[in-house]
Image: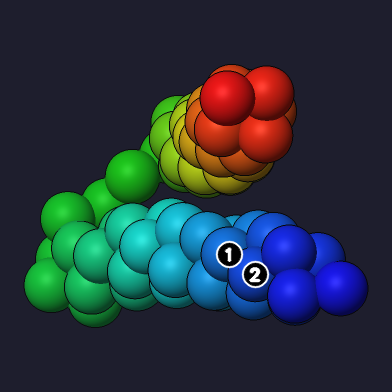
Amino acid sequence: MEKDIVENFFSFQLKRKITGLYKSFFFILEDLNSEGIKIPEENYKRIRKRILDQGNDTIRELEEYFDKYLEFHKNK
């Protein structure tokens, strides 16, 4: 039971912090636009997709590493 709580807590915090990170990248893009640096719509969409893809890939990979870590220590 306690292990599930730790896993859920870790997973939730991981997603929350990485999601916050890529939201901050979106704010930077908006700041650039408001400062007069115009990013064409096609480029903006490509950058936005890259940010989302990298964030999601990072979450997945870190969760996989954490699962492997737990499995390793469970089998000790």
Closer to us: 14 or 32: 14
Q: Nearer the viewer, residue 76 or 2?
A: 76
Q: Is residue 13 left or right of residue 21?
A: right
Type of the residue with mark 2 = Val
Count of marks placed on residues: 2
Q: Quadrant of residue 8?
A: bottom right
Q: Which residue is mark 2?
A: 6
Q: Position of residue 67 (x, y in %)?
A: 67, 34
Look at the picture and state if 43 lies above or below 3: above
* Residue 30 x %, y %: 34, 69
Disc number for residue 45: none
Which residue is at 68% across, 23% downward? 75
- Quarter of the image where the C terminus is located: top right
Identify the secondary structure beneath mark 2: helix
Q: Say whether marks 2 and 1 touch (CB < 8 Å).
A: yes
Q: Which residue is disc 1 drawn over?
A: 10
Circle 1 packing at 10 Å, graded few (<14), some (14-19), many (20+), is some
- Asked if residue 41 can be seen in this view, the reply is no
**Label 1: which secondary element:** helix
- Residue at figure coordinates x 54%, y 72% from the top left: 13
Is residue 23 shown above or below 55? below
Looking at the figure, which quarter contains the N terminus? Answer: bottom right
Up/down of 5 relative to 73, above or below: below
Q: Position of residue 20 (x, y in %)?
A: 45, 71
**Dot 2, crowdedness within 10 Å: few (<14), some or many (≥20)?**
few
